[in-house]
Amino acid sequence: MARWVEVPADVAARHPLHGMRGWLRFFSIWIALAAIGGVMLAVRDAGTLAGAAGGDAVAESLIGLVTTAVQLVVAVLWFRAWPRFRRFFAGLVVVATLVALAFDLWEWRALDGGSSDALAEQVATDLVGTAGMLVLLAYMQASRRFRVTFENRVRQDDWLLADLR
């Protein structure tokens, strides 16, 4: 595993890998679309929440609103290149996965012999979402561009390190 050296922000800014290019663009688009889609769903869920009398509709709308809030926080922290984003996102992956599994278990118990097609679809959606977050997390862990741009860190053996200082 490479050792990372923290450098001043101005030094990191001069590194050729600094900036939202390469795969960071792809993840930027993904995060932006998730936030925009979340807001659109939140508007729909807010309408459902306002007119809902049943417990399931209210619970699903609240889950949607909380998810949208989290997506917006992720987007803001990502586009501000927050230095602690990687650690924050790792914690978010763990919490989001546990919460999704808990809600899937809750829905499974609520079925009482009913159709499990909707539950299977929800579990599949949760697994795809978790897989996407794990891909982003793995990229952040291994990416030199991410470390330079977000954390002002370069590899200790980076041949440009002496030239940048």
Image: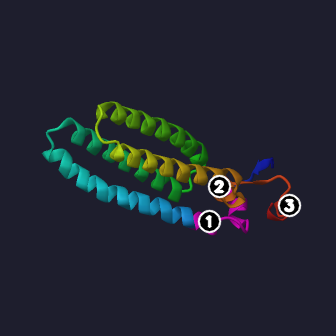
Give the numbered dot on residue 139.
Answer: 2
Image point (36%, 60%), residue name = 37
- Residue 152's x, y, as percent? 68, 54
Compared across the picture, whether 157 is left or right of 28 comes to right
Q: Which residue range is magenta in the image?
A: 9-25
Give the numbered dot on residue 23.
Answer: 1
Give the numbered dot on residue 98.
Answer: none
Dot 2 and dot 1 residues touching (CB under 8 Å)? yes
Quadrant of the image occupied by residue 15: bottom right
Q: CA distance from mark 1 to mark 3?
A: 26 Å
| In the image, residue 12 lies in the stretch drawn in magenta | yes
Image point (25%, 50%), residue name = 45
Quadrant of the image occupied by residue 87: top right
Give the numbered dot on residue 162.
Answer: 3
Foreground pick, 111 / 141: 111
Foreground pick, 12 / 22: 22
Q: CA distance from mark 2 to mark 3?
A: 26 Å
Dot 2 and dot 3 residues touching (CB under 8 Å)? no
Residue 133 visible, this angle: yes
Between circles 1 and 3, the one closer to the viewer is 1
First of labels 1, 3 by sequence position = 1
For numbered disc 1, what is the local secondary structure? helix
Q: CA distance from mark 2 to mark 1?
A: 9 Å
What amino acid type should be assigned to the residue bearing mark 3?
A: Ala
